Amino acid sequence: MRIAIAGLVHEANTFVAERADLATWQRQGVFEAEEIRRCHRGARTVAAGFLLLEEEADDVELVPIVHSMIMPTGISTHEAYTSLADRIVDGIRAQGPWDAVLLDLHGAAVSEVERDADGALARRVREVVGVDVPIGVTLDLHANVSELLVEMSSIITVYQTNPHIDAADRGLDCARLVARMVREQLRPNMALVRLPIAIDILCQSTDEGPMVPLMQQAREVEKRSDVLSVSLVEGFPYADVAEMGMCVLVTTDESSDAADELAHALARSVWDAREEMIGSRMSPEDALREAEAEAERQGPVVVLDVGDNVGAGSPGDSTHLLHAARALGVRGVAMPLSDPVAVEACARVGVGGRVRISVGGRTDDAHGEPFDIDGEVIALHDGVFEDSSPTHLGQTTFDVGASAGVRTDDGILLALSSYRTGTFSRVQFSIVGIDPQRTPIVIAKGVHSPRAAFEPIASRLIWADTPGATRSDITALAYEHRPRPAFPFETDARWS
């Protein structure tokens, strides 16, 4: 059984001005053939999950074609998207015929031309392999699932945890179902029900809040003998596309009527819980005051920088919380910042040297003004490290670019990196001389993605609703293409 593996993974924040050009993709890694195995072997990524099928099935040969995954940012340039899509499609065409294809996609990719970039790629793959070859797709929990993507796919599985620690499991689920389609002539029936709801990022944790009972209901439905897969999909509210919003995807091995009925029942529960999907927001100042009080009793406290959620496309250089901490006199704060200019300044003076520089706030006014510091460089590092502990998306290898640790004279610890990166690993701090377990207040660039790494050491998590490209209040964003009416933008929206 020959199965092709390919991937093009990008969560595109359409409210971010930066474009993901071909150089961005190449810097973060475009892997071919056996490079894909080496990159994902031992990880907990979707591609790693696909590859596990070969270990448990003697009759399977997995053939990696092209795979690339970048940090969320603005939309992809037309050149970058078409270049990478062409390489995937041409590779599948050249190395066929195939018994099946496995695609690792995000579900919220957007290019300058293709607003449904994932659906467009699936369509091109379908045109190459024909209607009879199964195509399995694994998506992120924040996918904006289109009818086109469902139509072009034979089976779709979706992460069901946030932070995303089940990527490999869902990839393996998808691979197993595709193999069953080949062996057993299984013909899955998928039902997609899209809802006019955009869920507040603060309510998207699958370990608390409104998502817990909904996920429990989904897992109960999945226990039915005729059900192959159930996915409750949160959607990505920072992508201004027609498919933006929550949806339910149910796959059965019998009638399409059963899949449709089950999907609508779960969707009704989601709709009934919509009022619970608006989070309570805390100002940066109030968040830091609470963190300081809590840290004095227990510590460390992790403050999540909502408006600079790099895992949703923000720049990673917001300084709002730094300015607030200084104004309030809050000390013992550690925070990461993406700032290659500051890293270079630190490298020039070396470890133990003194710096007087401005850090952060270089992208735009929305993410704060530059933050002036006087301090000591405590460490320098090339930014390449490994982390085998649980992390968002199951990554085990990281490259945050040349990095520096700085201790400012007013008691702030900065983990400066050259590349824009989410706060997915505690090692990102330790490589530059900062121990997050011994720091009273740790600020993380993210909302839920840092939790896998930082919740085990935190006495408390506090979300600070900072301004920025990933602000909690999505009703303040200027949409042009989203569904209308939709909750919470139109509070009187109806769904049946």
Image (spheres, helix red, strand yellow):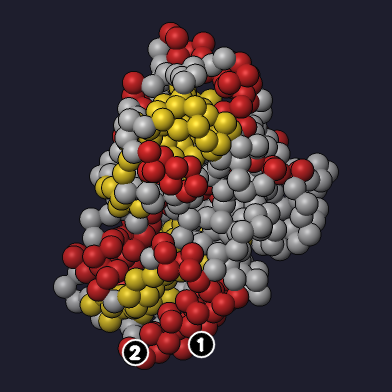
Q: Residue furthest left?
A: 58
- Residue 73 in percent (x, y) is at 56, 56
Q: Nearer the viewer, residue 391 or 320?
A: 320
Q: Amino acid at mark 2?
A: Gly
SS type, badge 1: helix
Q: Is residue 191 left or right of residue 345?
A: right
- Residue 326 in percent (x, y) is at 58, 21
Q: Residue at x 41, y 40 (%)?
A: 346
- Residue 262 in percent (x, y) is at 56, 55
Q: Residue at x 71, y 53 (%)?
A: 196
Q: Is residue 141 left or right of residue 407?
A: right
For label 2, the crowd category at 10 Å Cα-Cα, with few meaning under 14, some 14 to 19 and many 20 or more, is some
Q: Are marks 1 and 2 in contact (CB under 8 Å)?
A: no
Mark positioned earlier in the residue sequence (1 or 2): 2
Q: Nearer the viewer, residue 203 or 467?
A: 467
SS type, badge 2: loop
In the rendered view, would you say 156 is above or below 212?
A: below
In the rendered view, would you say 286 is above or below 111?
A: above
Task: Look at mark 2 in the image and give the residue it sits on.
Answer: 96
Can you see residue 413? no
Task: Look at mark 1 in the image and give the residue it sits on.
Answer: 127
* Quadrant of the image occupied by residue 423: top left
For label 1, the crowd category at 10 Å Cα-Cα, with few meaning under 14, some 14 to 19 and many 20 or more, is few
Inter-mark Cα distance, 1 to 2: 13 Å
In the rendered view, would you say 203 is above or below 7?
A: above
Can you see residue 60? yes
